[in-house]
Amino acid sequence: MLKRIVVVAGSILVIVLLFRFCEFKKGDTSSLAYNTNLLQQQIVNVGKLVVTEGHFSQVLTYKDQDNYFGGIVSFKKKALLIVNAEVSVSYDLRQIKYDINEKKKIISILNIPQEEIKISPDIQFYDVDQSRLNPFTGDDYNKINQSVKINLAKKMQQSSLKSNAQNRLISELSKILILTNAMGWTLQYEGKTIQSERDFNPKL
């Protein structure tokens, strides 16, 4: 009789331990799934269009000359141009690509989209001087517009606009970094571990 009681008690103990173990495993899996969903949601929140805008102004002089008979006869045209332009640098983070390794608790950013630069110049013509034989045409306006955009692109590169845009990009990406650190995960980009915002700088 005593032996039977011991066997029954032992069986009950084994069942209870198995039940507790299954509960523990279930809880661990649920936590991992929750963490993964939270990380994915954070990436969705970051995935937006980050735009940094700037305003540029410049004054240019456009000159053109048509020569005839070896330069003996020429017809000139020129104009003073005042340019006001809106320039924007944007990152479409909706295109960001990533991979989540649940076992190793690593989130890897695979690709960050390149910046998109948009230049919208407003060109005003003053002191226009032209000849009937060499008037301003559509080709002139196209050349002027192209030249203005090239000059503005150079000015933009020399300004703080692009670096400001990168700083805003890093600020958005750091939101993922903060969450991964808080949850005990590791954030990687291009195969290297990101431990602080500074680690993003050389890679962008």
Image (spheres, grey):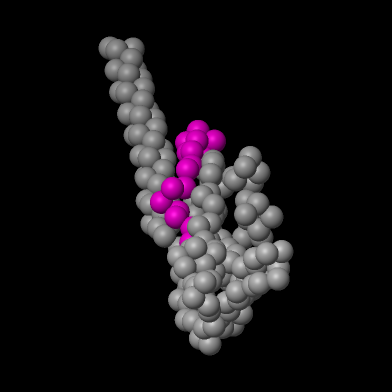
- Total marks shown come to 0
In the picture, residue 177 is in which quadrant?
A: bottom right
* Residue drawn at 47 percent across, 68 percent down: 137
Residue 193 lies, with reference to residue 11, above or below; the image says below
* Residue drawn at 58 percent across, 66 percent down: 147
Task: Tell me if residue 110 can be seen.
Answer: yes
- Looking at this view, is 195 or 170 the one in front? 170
- Looking at this view, is 4 or 122 the one in front? 122
* Residue drawn at 37 percent across, 45 percent down: 37
- Looking at this view, is 149 or 50 the one in front? 149
Q: Which residues are magenta?
A: 87-105
* Residue drawn at 56 percent across, 47 percent down: 187
Residue 35 appears at what percent x and percent y? 41, 46
User: With 164 as the anchor, is 175 left or right in this view?
Assistant: left
- Looking at this view, is 81 or 114 the one in front? 81
Residue 159 lies, with reference to residue 176, above or below; the image says below
Residue 154 lies, with reference to residue 41, above or below; the image says below
Quarter of the image with the N terminus in it: top left
Q: Residue furthest bottom?
A: 127
| Residue 138 lies within the magenta run | no
Quarter of the image with the C terminus in it: bottom right
Residue 127 appears at what percent x and percent y? 53, 87
In the picture, residue 159 is in which quadrant?
A: bottom right
Residue 196 lies, with reference to residue 14, above or below; the image says below
Task: Tell me if residue 85 can be seen.
Answer: no
Residue 69 appears at what percent x and percent y? 68, 64
In the picture, residue 45 is in which quadrant?
A: bottom left
